[in-house]
Image (tube, helix red, strand yellow):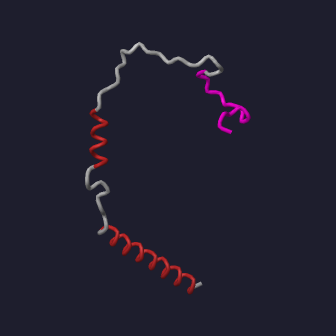
Amino acid sequence: MFLIRYFLRKTIYLVLLFLEENLRSKAKQVVDPDSHKIYSRRKEKQGTSSEPDTNSNESVQFPSSGWGTSLEKMAPNESPYF
């Protein structure tokens, strides 16, 4: 029983030591993923883009040949993709 506790404590100690050293080395390798501000500029442009015109009187027309707005699940043998 003593040996099991000893090896268990030693194993836990070694794992914690490994994790601590690994975290220290990773902290030095932190890099800015957007150093050229490509994604930041794109996000800024999306935030300042104009809002769509909500006063438009256009409506969506669905084909009359079996199409509709129903969200029912189609039978597998009726799928146009298979």
Image quadrant where residue 27 sits? bottom left
Indicate whether residue 55 is drawn in magenta: no
Q: Is residue 78 magenta?
A: yes
Instruction: Tell me what residue is drawn at x 36 percent, y 69 percent.
Output: 23
Q: Can you give x and y, in whole percent of width and height, for residue 43 in the image?
A: 31, 41
Residue that lies at the very extreme toward the right in this rendered image: 77
Q: In the image shown, does 66 or 20 lie closer to the viewer?
A: 66
Q: Looking at the figure, which quarter contains the C terminus?
A: top right
Instruction: Give left or right: position of 37 versus 61.
Output: left
Estimate the x, y position of residue 17 in percent, counting from the top left.
40, 77
Query: Looking at the image, which residue is at 27% across and 40% down?
Result: 44
> Residue at 29% across / 32% down in the picture?
49
Q: Is residue 4 above or below residue 59?
A: below
Question: To which quarter of the image does residue 1 belong?
Answer: bottom right
Start and end of the magenta stretch? 68-82
Q: Number of labelled discs?
A: 0
Is residue 15 shown above or below 62? below
Q: Residue furthest top?
A: 57
**Does residue 59 appear left or right of residue 55 in this picture?**
right
How far from the left and from the top, in percent, is residue 48? 27, 33
Q: Nearer the viewer, residue 12 or 20?
A: 20
Majority secondary structure of magenta residues: loop
* Residue at x 64% of width, y 19% of height: 65
Picture quadrant where residue 13 is located: bottom left
> As rendered, which of 15 and 3 lies closer to the eye?
15
Residue 7: where, in percent of width, then height?
A: 53, 83
